[in-house]
Image (cartoon, rainbow, N blue to C red):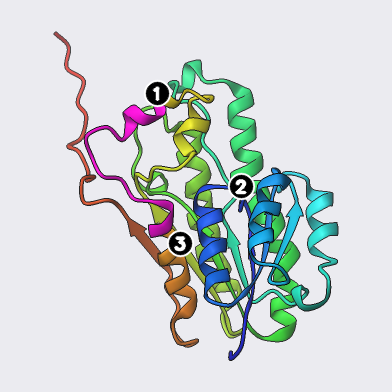
Amino acid sequence: MSGPRTILVTGASSGFGEATARKFLEAGDRVIATARRMARLEALADEHREHCLPLALDVRDREAVMSILGSLPGPFSDVDVLVNNAGLALGLAPADQADLDHWDTMVDTNIKGLTYCTRAILPGMVARGRGHIVNLGSVAASWPYPGGNAYGATKAFVQQFSRNLRTDLLGRNIRVSLVEPGMCETEFSVVRFDGDKDKAAAVYEGMQPLSAADIAEIVFWTTSLPPHINVNQLEVMPVAQAWSPFAVHRDS
């Protein structure tokens, strides 16, 4: 496709979403930036007048998603790329102590919100015979860690949902890509630890994590390849992160 594309980025008020929106805008594309924090989106739109459409949207609200994304205005109506970025982790307690409200919020956002946005945009892509869905997952989908219980499970859903989308869309000229980052310093850990910035900073102490800009670069690259190429799944970690041996509990 020649000319500017129309990109929809969810969770665009910070982190991966904001960096990804900026990357596409800087490349000359049109961006629909959605999130709950409208003030942040308006600040982004002020920098890119006419090319950025800020929309207040909670992806957990099924009716709002279908209504708002089903009535996009003018040049923003035909979405070429959907970046399903909105998501979060809450808490790090073991499963027997976890807050059920945290689990509900992660399921509602990471799973339901992603499926709502996909379902709202996908029929238009199918009708036009083109499009690209990029889902933001996590290495936690494949590699468990203590306290990652529900969060890892939600990202495992994103992984399998992405694969099944590919099978459903075979022959429809629509690409589906899954990007699964490892340790990346954004607001992610601040949210996970309920605003405790010191605890969040300690997660990345003494190592160089990925940045939001790194992930934005990868998302942009996957969508900029020739149209016959589909990046199915891309797992990325900082060099300072790797896997550990299996944990073994021994009776003393």
Q: Mark 3, residues whose alpha carbon is within 10 Å: few (<14), some, or many (≥20)?
A: many
- Left or right, 83 with respect to 244, comes to right
Q: CA distance from mark 1 to mark 3?
A: 26 Å
On the image, the x and y values in percent for residue 211 come to 38, 51
Give the farthest residue toward the left: 252
Is residue 15 within the magenta segment? no
Magenta-tinted stretch? 198-214
The residue indicated by pointer 1 is 198
* Residue type at tag 1: Asp
On the image, the x and y values in percent for residue 133 come to 58, 68
| Nearer-N-terminus badge (3/2) | 2
Q: Mark 1, residues whose alpha carbon is within 10 Å: few (<14), some, or many (≥20)?
A: few
Identity of the residue drawn at 78% across and 45% down: 61
The residue indicated by pointer 3 is 216
Identity of the residue drawn at 70% across and 68% down: 49
Image position of 207 with respect to 115: above or below: above
Picture quarter with the C terminus? top left
Image position of 116 with respect to 242: above or below: below
Q: Secondary structure at mark 3?
A: helix
* Residue type at tag 3: Ala
Number of numbered labels in the structure image: 3
| Nearer-N-terminus badge (1/2) | 2
Picture quarter with the N terminus? bottom right
Tell which of 58 and 22 is nearer to you: 22
Q: Which mark is residue 111?
A: 2
Tell which of 59 and 35 is nearer to you: 35
Q: Which mark is residue 174?
A: none
